[in-house]
Image: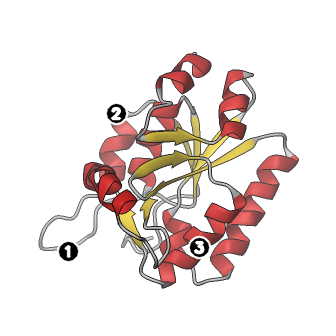
């Protein structure tokens, strides 16, 4: 059950916001949201405004939004308003890295380093991609994820750049609601 899954994840590497945990325990709808769009997809303050608008749309429909990100080496499922605001600023301040599934272990390993440093420059963020958001949402017991677009295959790339989103879509049992593929892909429509 979602409640049991939520309880399993309440260890030091995954923190579920109490509001999200309560909604999952009560079997109320929760929707996961990626954080890359906030940190890297739009300039500040439009990124913050978009995040607030999406959360408001979900709340108007009695759905709990759960923006997913990594902060100082801890995966966070659901962010406070202050955390969303800091993440929105962090992209332009170079305090946010794009984190896909392959990057999660590195960012989790940074936990001890960040907690021992003075961190005077603000929190270090890992902005989750579609793939890592799906993985963490599933781990927290969230069954639905909404995103503007998924990655794919970049045509003509020398390295045959295939997005981790494609593999994650095939192996992680989370419903993904998307407008389509990312606008940077050449899909020749």
Percent position of residue 162, x then y: 25, 58
In primary-sequence order, the first of circles 2 and 3 is 3
* Residue wearing tag 1: 156
Q: Quadrant of residue 172?
A: top left
What quarter of the picture does the N terminus occupy? top right
Image vertical order of residue 81 relative to residue 186, above or below: above
Identified at 67% across, 80% down, the residue is 46
In primary-sequence order, the first of circles 1 and 2 is 1
Q: Nearer the viewer, mark 3 or mark 1?
A: 3
In primary-sequence order, the first of circles 3 and 1 is 3
Report, in whole angstroms, how far the alpha carbon at label 3 lies from the one at label 1.
Answer: 32 Å
Instruction: Check residue 99 in the rendering and tell me which mark sits there, or answer none.
Output: none
* Residue wearing tag 3: 88
Report, in whole angstroms, how far the alpha carbon at label 2 lies from the one at label 3.
Answer: 30 Å
Contact between labelled residues 2 and 1, with CB atoms less than 8 Å apart: no
Q: Can I make out residue 99 in this image?
A: no
Q: Nearer the viewer, mark 1 or mark 2?
A: 2
The residue furthest left is 158
Q: Residues within 10 Å of mark 3 (few under 14, many from 20)?
A: many
Identified at 63% across, 64% down, the residue is 84
Q: Quadrant of residue 17?
A: top right
Image vertical order of residue 39 relative to residue 170, above or below: below
Residues 12 and 51: in front is 12
* Residue wearing tag 2: 171
Element at badge 3? helix
Left or right for 24, reference 76: right
Percent position of residue 18, x then y: 68, 37
Image vertical order of residue 3 relative to residue 22, above or below: above
Coloring scheme of the render? secondary structure
């Amino acid at each position: 059950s979602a409640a049991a899954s939520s309880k399993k994840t309440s260890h030091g590497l995954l923190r579920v916001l109490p509001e999200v945990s309560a909604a999952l325990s009560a079997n109320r709808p929760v929707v996961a949201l990626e954080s890359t769009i906030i940190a890297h997809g739009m300039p500040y303050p439009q990124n913050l405004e978009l995040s607030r608008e999406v959360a408001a749309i979900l709340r108007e429909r009695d759905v709990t939004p759960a923006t997913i990100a990594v902060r100082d080496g801890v995966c966070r499922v659901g962010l406070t308003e202050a955390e969303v605001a800091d993440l929105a600023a962090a992209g332009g301040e170079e305090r946010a890295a794009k984190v896909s599934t392959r990057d999660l272990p590195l960012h989790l390993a940074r936990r001890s380093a960040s907690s021992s440093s003075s961190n005077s420059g603000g929190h270090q963020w890992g902005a989750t991609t579609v793939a890592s958001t799906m993985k963490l949402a599933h781990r927290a017991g969230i069954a639905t994820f909404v995103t503007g677009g998924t990655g794919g295959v970049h045509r003509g790339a020398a390295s045959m750049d295939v997005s981790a989103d494609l593999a994650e879509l095939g192996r992680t049992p989370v419903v993904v609601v998307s407008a389509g593929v990312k606008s940077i892909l050449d899909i020749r429509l």
